[in-house]
Amino acid sequence: MKVTVIGSGYVGLVSGACLADVGNDVLCLDVDPAKIKILTDGGIPIHEPGLQEMVRRNVDAGRLSFTTDVEKAAKYGAIQFIAVGTPPDEDGSADLKYVLAAARNIGKHMDGYRVIVDKSTVPVGTADKVHAAIAEELASRGEALEYSVVSNPEFLKEGAAIDDFMRPDRIVVGADDEKAIELMRLLYAPFQRNHDKLVFMDVRSAELTKYAANAMLATRISFMNELANLAEALGADVELVRQGIGSDPRIGRHFLYSGCGYGGSCFPKDVKALIQTANQAGVEVKVLTAVEEANDSQKHVLIEKIIKRFGEDLSGKRFAMWGLAFKPDTDDMREAPSRVMIDALLKRGATVTAYDPVAMPEAERIFGNESRLTYAGRPMSALEGADALLIVTEWKEFRSPDFDVIKSRLRAPVIFDGRNMYEPAHVKAQGIEYFAIGRK
Ligand code: UDX
């Protein structure tokens, strides 16, 4: 099949590459010529394991190409994925200007039947707006071409996106007509394997499903973070509580890890947007509002522990920070807890030496010329003369450090661990003061 993917960012590029990898001819469009140049030169503009090889393999096979030409893109695929950004506007609602611009371009240039697939995370009701935008363009051209608008939300985790696309748990498709349903069934046939992964529903339910999934996961995390804080106050251990409840199949083991808060491009944005959607619909969502508030304060939990240990005034203190990315295997720092912590430490007069395997260039871009924030080439060199170590991202390379080296490098052996990487008893036995999240 011929497929156009509009938007060559994270979601668009992963979807385009994976669809090409199963034999489709895919044209990826982006309005940013710099991005398209990187892609046509054989590079990729983001960090995602396995994506570079997959893109190259499919470009070499002639199945994947890139363009900035909107007309060519609209004329190319019978299936047109919209995978452009939906940044939050001032009130937290998703800004649809890129989605609707993409829709209008399709309407302007399409020359036959099209299935327009909303892949971007968009508020309930967006498919109707996309439909109307295309109708308007067609009407102004005096054309009466047939088209369908489908909602097909992505459930890609950064760092595991290729696997999530190639081996999905489910493929949610919201479609209101048979022709579109048939095309989507054909397109996703290679991903079906042994059992039916496709879940067909109406368009609005599909749009809501995406938000519901992310909000549910964010809720679990905020709930566990609250339990961790409670466990600390009560002298219980949240790790044991997690194991105790996770073994109940009704609860399940995933996304029960307490820490210094969730970040990323999805959870914070989607929870906010769903609250906005609810407000607009006149529905009070008390749980969601609490999830967001709890996460905002959780990002300060390590700072509170630091203040308790070192006092309000941190001037002259230096902190080593391991991990900047919002989670491992990505250089993404959107809404990352590390940003809140760096801001708070700098504001209190401290200096920070950070190490992250891939996100340091991103941090430099975000923090610019901040003289009190420096970077280390290796985890252990970040510790040299620091007053404490803060662990903010659970990269694998931090899992089994040489605690003797940590002790010898730090001015005093203190670790604040925002990701519960170690057994408290083990760290303490090494003569290190250890502050984790909800651990006994
Ligand atoms: C998420 C969803 O998982 C994915 O399905 C959706 O399409 C996009 O949003 P992503 O943002 O890439 O994916 O990361 P994810 O692995 O879900 O982690 C999000 C945040 O939650 C991270 O900051 C992570 O550290 C935090 N987290 C996750 C916890 O604090 N505890 C957990 O138990 C799990």
Image: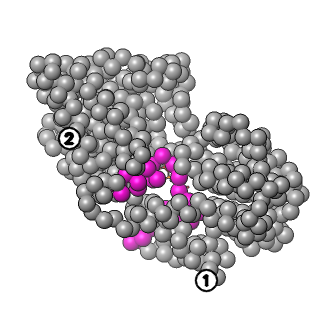
Name the spot of residue 115 as percent of width and height, x first.
22, 32
Give the residue at mark 1.
Answer: 234
Return the mark for residue 128: 2
Which quarter of the image is occupied by the C terminus? Answer: bottom right
Marks 2 & 1, CB-CB < 8 Å contact: no
Q: 380 or 88: nearer the eye? A: 88
Membership of 261 in magenta stretch: yes
Q: Would you identify the image quadrant in which residue 116 lies?
A: top left
Residue 25 in view, yes or no: yes
Q: Please, is residue 180 above or below residue 421 in the view?
A: above
Name the spot of residue 252 as percent of width and height, x first.
44, 68
Q: 368 or 410: nearer the eye? A: 368
Q: Respond yes or no on whether mark 2 lies under 8 Å from ligand 1.
A: no
> Residue visible at 54% across and 68% down?
225
Give the magenta range.
249-275
User: Number of marks in the image?
Assistant: 2
Relative placement, left or right, of 75 versus 191 is left
Name the spot of residue 188 as percent of width and height, x first.
30, 39
Q: Residues within 10 Å of mark 2 (few under 14, many from 20)?
A: few
> Residue visible at 34% across and 51% down?
210
Which quarter of the image is occupied by the N terminus? Answer: top left
Helix, strand or loop status at disc 2: helix
- Residues at marks 2 and 1, CA–CA distance in whole angstroms: 51 Å
Q: Would you identify the image quadrant in which residue 345 lies?
A: bottom right
**Residue type pointed to by label 1:** Leu
**Residue type pointed to by label 2:** Asp
Q: Please, is residue 203 above or below residue 47 in the view?
A: below
Labels 2 and 1: the sequence-earlier one: 2
